[in-house]
Image (spheres, rainbow, N blue to C red):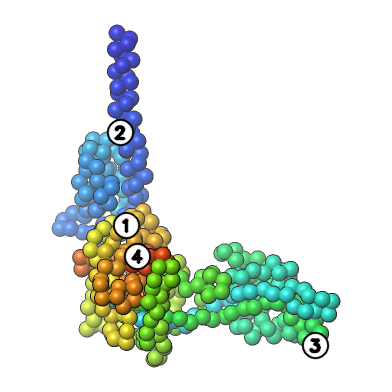
């Protein structure tokens, strides 16, 4: 009898353990919260396919998800949201960014009266640091740093520096050179400029969104926190074709007056406020929720010549449904033979190109794979729209 009970216990454990592990896995896979869209008199929450085990993919909001319709897994908090419509981009735009301080791009030794010294290194200044104050005075321009050092007379200057989101103070003591001038071996930059691709304009709020990632300093690779900036029209004059191991690049020029003031240069893109919102004649597309994005055929909107944006065939190869806060939410591959023949795939400057699927704006191209320029990462359009809304509400 005991042997039979022991055998039954072992059999039960062998059955229940995998089920328990599966339930735990699905509990991790399911999001804690999600947006839903009204459908008729009810709201439904579409789940990733990997979470659809013995449960409808469209489960009623507010009810717990159950494994095989029996075992409770997790309750998902849902927020009902009306479908949002935006004007898709694809056009190139110019960016003028003014740093919120001055960015340290390099530190170097200087020939002082007593030999070679490196005051900047001694002050623990590093490429990518943001100098925001000198002796309590806000600095925004390279010239202000140069003047403070030149006029120091060798006196120690107290710098307020931001690094990786933290603020600290450090002492910088310029050295006297053989020509009588004072130097600190500090190379800084206060502004940056470049081109990218517009992802969308929101006619409801007047917000502009593009790139899908931050503009980084060319020397330090650090995202540039901005105090101000402008979006200006730009025209593509040519491009360098991508090849394995060497991403190509769009070549463009600014060709008009600013049409938006920039508000943020952040992880999910560059955002600004349009000076004019007269867009009644432009096509608007619905923005997909994260859980609506799926593997399969898609299109990207891009501009690779002096004309208007065009649609090119692509395919979403992978979707990472739980990566909502990241800019690497999906992998997209260019399949359009014409675009491949012209550019070799994705090139620099195409960051921000809208990704369309089933008539929805689902995301934007953010990065090209260096060793395979046919593929790159994409960010969810919903993430960019949420960032744009936060900035608009903060004004």
For the residue labelled by badge 3, is the local secondary structure a helix, a strand or a loop? loop
Q: Which mark is residue 179?
A: 3
Task: Reply above or below: 297 against 259.
Answer: above
Residue beneath the point at 82% across and 76% down: 115
Q: Which residue is mark 4?
A: 375
Mark 1, Cα crowd under 10 Å, few <14 / some 14-19 / many 20+, is many
Q: x, y percentage for residue 63?
A: 25, 45
**Which label's residue is closer to the chain start, 2 or 1?**
2
Residue 90 in sight here: no
In primary-sequence order, the first of circles 3 and 2 is 2
Q: Quadrant of residue 376?
A: bottom left
Which of label 1 and label 4 is nearer to you? 4
Q: Nearer the viewer, residue 196 or 99?
A: 196
Q: CA distance from mark 3 to mark 4?
A: 55 Å
Query: Is residue 320 among what the camera can see?
Result: yes
SS at mark 4?
strand
Q: Secondary structure at mark 2?
A: helix
CA neighbours of label 3 inside 10 A, class few (<14), some (14 to 19), many (20+): few
Q: In the image, which disc is placed on residue 19?
A: 2
Q: CA distance from mark 2 to mark 1?
A: 26 Å
Quadrant in which the N terminus is drawn: top left
Residue farthest along the top direction in this orientation: 1
**Circle 1 is placed at which residue position?**
319
Q: CA distance from mark 3 to mark 1?
A: 61 Å
Farthest residue toward the bottom? 256
């Amino acid at each position: 009898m005991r042997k039979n009970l022991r055998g039954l216990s072992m059999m039960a454990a062998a059955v229940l353990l995998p089920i328990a592990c599966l339930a735990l896995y699905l509990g991790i896979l399911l999001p804690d919260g999600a947006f839903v869209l009204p459908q008729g008199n009810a709201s439904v929450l579409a789940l990733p396919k990997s979470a659809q085990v013995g449960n409808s993919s469209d489960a009623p909001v507010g009810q717990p998800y159950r494994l095989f319709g029996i075992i409770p897994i997790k309750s998902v908090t849902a927020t009902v949201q009306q479908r949002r419509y935006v004007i898709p981009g694809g056009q190139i735009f110019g960016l003028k960014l003014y740093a919120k301080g001055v960015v340290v791009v390099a530190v170097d030794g200087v020939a002082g009266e007593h030999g070679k010294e490196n005051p900047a290194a001694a002050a623990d200044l590093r490429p990518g640091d943001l100098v925001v104050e000198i002796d309590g005075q806000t600095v925004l321009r390279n010239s202000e740093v140069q003047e403070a050092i030149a006029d120091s007379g060798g006196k120690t200057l107290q710098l307020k520096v931001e690094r990786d989101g933290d603020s600290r103070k450090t002492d910088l003591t310029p050295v006297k050179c053989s020509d009588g001038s004072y130097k600190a071996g500090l190379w800084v930059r206060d502004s940056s400029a470049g081109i990218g691709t517009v992802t969308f304009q929101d006619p409801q709020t007047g917000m502009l969104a593009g790139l899908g990632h931050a503009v980084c300093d060319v020397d330090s690779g650090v995202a540039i926190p901005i105090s101000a900036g402008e979006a200006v029209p730009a025209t593509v004059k040519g491009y360098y074709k991508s090849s394995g191991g060497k991403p190509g690049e769009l070549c463009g020029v600014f060709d008009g007056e600013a049409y938006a003031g920039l508000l943020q240069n952040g992880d999910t893109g560059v955002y600004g406020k349009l000076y004019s919102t007269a867009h009644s004649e432009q096509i608007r597309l619905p923005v997909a929720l994260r859980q609506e994005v799926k593997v399969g055929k898609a299109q990207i909107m891009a501009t690779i010549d002096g004309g208007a944006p065009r649609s090119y065939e692509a395919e979403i190869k992978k979707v990472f449904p739980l990566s909502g806060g990241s800019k690497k939410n999906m992998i997209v591959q260019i399949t359009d033979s014409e675009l491949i023949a012209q550019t070799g795939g994705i090139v620099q400057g195409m960051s921000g190109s809208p990704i369309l699927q089933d008539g929805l704006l689902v995301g934007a191209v953010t990065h090209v794979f260096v060793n395979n320029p046919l593929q790159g990462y994409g960010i969810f359009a919903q993430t960019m729209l949420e960032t744009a809304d936060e900035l608009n509400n903060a004004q």
